Image (cartoon, helix red, strand yellow):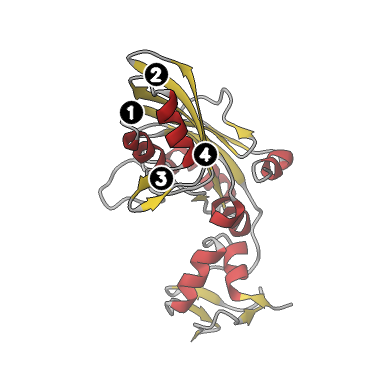
Amino acid sequence: MEIRLQKLLANAGVASRRKAEALITAGRVTVNGIIRTELGTKASPNDEIAVDGKGIGGKPKQNLYVMLHKPEGVVTTVTDPFDRPTVMEFLTEILEEKHTRLFPVGRLDYDTSGLLLLTNDGDWTNILTHPRHKVSKTYIAIVQGTPSPQALDTFRNGVEIDGKPTAHCAIEIISQGSQSKVRITIKEGRNRQVRKMCEAINHPVITLKRVAVGRLQLGDLPRGKWRYLTKGEVEQCIQS
């Protein structure tokens, strides 16, 4: 049975479907030795498919879903040109055992800790990261000072960062003082968004930790440790 080439690449754990489409249009994918750049191209798992000349194998791999408690000082990439530690270094055991590749679902900043999901399921990644699905992300932040009610309302209603307003979101104060703890929930995934939003209301972030994606909670998973998601959790984290 033939299926679209980008779906086959995603099923094989090469990349998310959107990134697979970019690989195809860039001329980096061959089917039976022929470069295919059309997104409508279909292929069979029995075809010889390669990316940059390296065969991927057409047989879909077992889908894996992993939660990692990412520490600060680690980059959310598979490799890093500056030789900084990456999140993949915490997953050596599973990568060797399963003989597969995993990819981060979205990003967490170098200096942000907390819940990071990794998978080889491109479709699931697309659901969690595509803006139209509006999957919520919840953070606990320590910020300088105590935001006033007016500042909190401004934050909730949207502030301008990088020349574009943010969507409505939630913020509440957990404890206050010269440094205050706040809970923030957003449904966007812009670069360093929470930090930039806090700066926009003049309460810069001191520390930031993601504690939930959708309805999936980080819980008491120790920093630097990972675990598999249950089948129920796989669905839970994409439910509003």
The answer to which of marks 1 and 4 sits earlier in the sequence is 4
Cα separation, mark 2 vs mark 1, equals 9 Å
Q: Is residue 220 visible?
A: yes
Question: Dots 1 and 4: beta carbons under 8 Å?
Answer: no
Coordinates of residue 238 in the picture (x, y in percent): 65, 46
For the point 65% across and 63% down, the residue is: 60
> What residue is pinned by disc 2?
180
Question: Dots 2 and 1: beta carbons under 8 Å?
Answer: yes
The answer to which of marks 4 and 3 sits earlier in the sequence is 3
**Residue 76, which numbered label?**
3
> What residue is pinned by disc 4?
169
- Crowding near pointer 1: few (<14 within 10 Å), some, many (20+)? many
Query: The disc labelled 3 sits on which kind of residue?
Result: Thr
Q: Nearer the viewer, residue 30 or 200?
A: 200
Mark 3 or 2: in front is: 2
Cα separation, mark 1 vs mark 4, equals 17 Å
- Crowding near pointer 4: few (<14 within 10 Å), some, many (20+)? some
Mark 4 or 3: in front is: 4
Q: Nearer the viewer, residue 193 or 45?
A: 193
For the point 53% across and 83% down, the residue is: 38
